[in-house]
Image (cartoon, grey):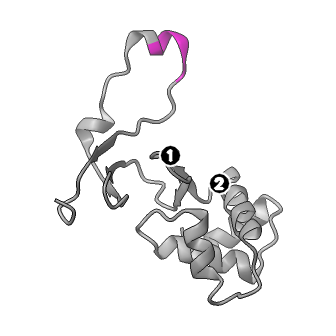
């Protein structure tokens, strides 16, 4: 999402656009490592030394609530975030904890089991593969 669209979406939801919020969004947008709130806090405080972790965390939750960013599955650690709204899946390295995006039409087309269809309404499908990345092998 472009900066202009980000600003528009914030305005539509009554979320004030501050320099800190813009910086948090821009850092997350250029990050492909699916950073946690703490990782973003460490990066953003280089430009805003007085920003608190709580401000970064609450900002991420607000962004998530209005659909600007998306939380990434837990992976046994802190919640992590991304801006990629396109249908995709994740590979999680159990050694270095890197999360990588990948596309797969086969995974997008996985059939929902009847038991789940009868009990729930599925809105999205995300497959998570866990293993060891090539750098850690």
Which residue does the numbered mark 1 point to in the structure image?
A: 74
Q: Position of residue 104 (x, y in %)?
A: 26, 45
Quadrant housing residue 4: bottom right
Disc 2 is placed on an element classified as helix
Q: Position of residue 125 (x, y in %)?
A: 42, 35
Q: Which one is earlier in the sequence, the residue at label 1 or at label 2?
A: 2
**Quadrant that contains the N terminus:** bottom right
Q: Which residues are magenta?
A: 116-121
Mark 1 residue crowding within 10 angstroms, few (<14) / some (14–19) / many (20+) = few
Whether residue 66 is in magenta: the answer is no
Which residue does the numbered mark 2 point to in the structure image?
A: 64
Viewer-side residue, 63 vs 93? 93
Q: Number of numbered discs present?
A: 2
Residue drawn at the location 69% of the way across and 72% of the way down: 7
In whole angstroms, how far apart are the C-alphas of marks 1 and 2? 15 Å
Viewer-side residue, 71 vs 112? 71
Disc 1 is placed on an element classified as loop
Numbered tag placed on residue 117 in the rendering: none
Q: Is residue 55 above or below residue 98?
A: below
Mark 2 residue crowding within 10 angstroms, few (<14) / some (14–19) / many (20+) = some
Whether residue 118 is in magenta: the answer is yes
Q: Which residue is outermost to the front? A: 95
Q: Main secondary structure of the magenta part?
A: helix
């Amino acid at each position: 999402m472009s900066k202009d669209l980000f600003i528009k979406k914030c305005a539509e939801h009554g979320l004030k656009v501050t320099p800190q919020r813009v910086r948090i969004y821009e850092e997350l947008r250029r990050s492909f490592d699916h950073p946690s709130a703490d990782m973003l806090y460490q990066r953003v405080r280089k430009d805003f030394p007085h920003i608190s972790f709580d401000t970064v965390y609450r900002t991420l939750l607000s962004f998530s609530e209005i659909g600007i960013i998306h939380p990434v599955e837990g992976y046994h650690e802190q919640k992590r975030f991304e801006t990629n709204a396109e249908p995709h899946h994740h590979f999680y390295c159990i050694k270095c904890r890197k999360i990588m995006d990948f596309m797969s039409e086969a995974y997008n087309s996985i059939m929902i089991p009847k038991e789940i269809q009868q009990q729930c309404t599925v809105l999205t499908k995300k497959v998570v593969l866990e293993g060891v990345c090539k750098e850690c092998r």
